[in-house]
C-alpha cells in the first residue's frame, strides 16, 4: 500500500463496497470514512502581486496604471490606489493575478496531496 492522490485512488477497486452491476466499485477516496490523509494539508499559496517601478501618485491612482514592466503577465489585473494617505487607509497601486488563475493554482497544490485507504492499516514507509 502506498500514498496516492485522490485521482489515482479513483481508479482503484474498493474492496469494502458492495459490487455494482459490472462487478466492482471504484474507490471514492476522501468521500469514504476509511480514507486517511498521509500528508499535511498544503499551505494555501498567496495571490501573486507585482509592484510598479513608479511612485507617481497620479499614475498609481489611474484606472489604466503605469506601463507594465517585464515579468508582469498580460493577464494580471491593475489595482489603482484608493483611499487617502492622511488616514493611512489606502490600498492598491499594484497588479495581481486574476481570481481564476489563483484558484487554479490552489486546486493544483491541493490535488497533489496524497492519502491512503485506512481500512487495512497504514502504508509502508517509502525508502
Image (cartoon, rainbow, N blue to C red):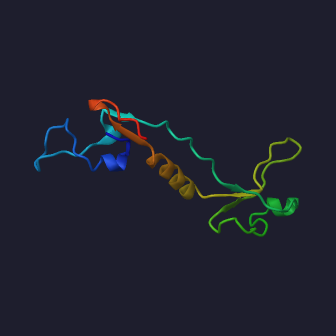
3 and 78: which one is in front? 3
Q: Position of residue 15 (x, y in %)?
A: 19, 38
Q: Position of residue 13 (x, y in %)?
A: 22, 45
Image point (48%, 52%), residue name: 108
Judged from this view, the residue extending furthest toward the front is 127
40 and 50: which one is in front? 40
Image point (87%, 59%), residue name: 55
In what quadrant of the picture does the C terminus appear?
Answer: top left
Q: Position of residue 60 (x, y in %)?
A: 81, 60
Q: Is residue 82 left or right of residue 56?
A: left
80 and 45: which one is in front? 45
Image point (60%, 58%), residue name: 98
Above or below: residue 62 compared with residue 91: below
Above or below: residue 67 compared with residue 23: below
10 and 46: which one is in front? 10
Q: Is residue 117 left or right of residue 43?
A: left
Picture mark count: 0
In what quadrant of the picture does the N terminus appear?
Answer: top left
Determine which quarter of the picture holds residue 30: top left
Image point (29%, 48%), residue name: 10
Q: Position of residue 88 (x, y in %)?
A: 84, 42
Amino acid at each position: 500500500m502506498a500514498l496516492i492522490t485522490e485521482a489515482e485512488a479513483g481508479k482503484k477497486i474498493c474492496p469494502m463496497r458492495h459490487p455494482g452491476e459490472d462487478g466492482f466499485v471504484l474507490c471514492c477516496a476522501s468521500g469514504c470514512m476509511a480514507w486517511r490523509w498521509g500528508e499535511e494539508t498544503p499551505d494555501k499559496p498567496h495571490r501573486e502581486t507585482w509592484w510598479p517601478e513608479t511612485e507617481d501618485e497620479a499614475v498609481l491612482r489611474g484606472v489604466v496604471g503605469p506601463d507594465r514592466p517585464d515579468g508582469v503577465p498580460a493577464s494580471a489585473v491593475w489595482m489603482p490606489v484608493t483611499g487617502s494617505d492622511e488616514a493611512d487607509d489606502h490600498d492598491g497601486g499594484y497588479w495581481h493575478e486574476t481570481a481564476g488563475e489563483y484558484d487554479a493554482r490552489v486546486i493544483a497544490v491541493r490535488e497533489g496531496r496524497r492519502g491512503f485507504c485506512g481500512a487495512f492499516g497504514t502504508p509502508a514507509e517509502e525508502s
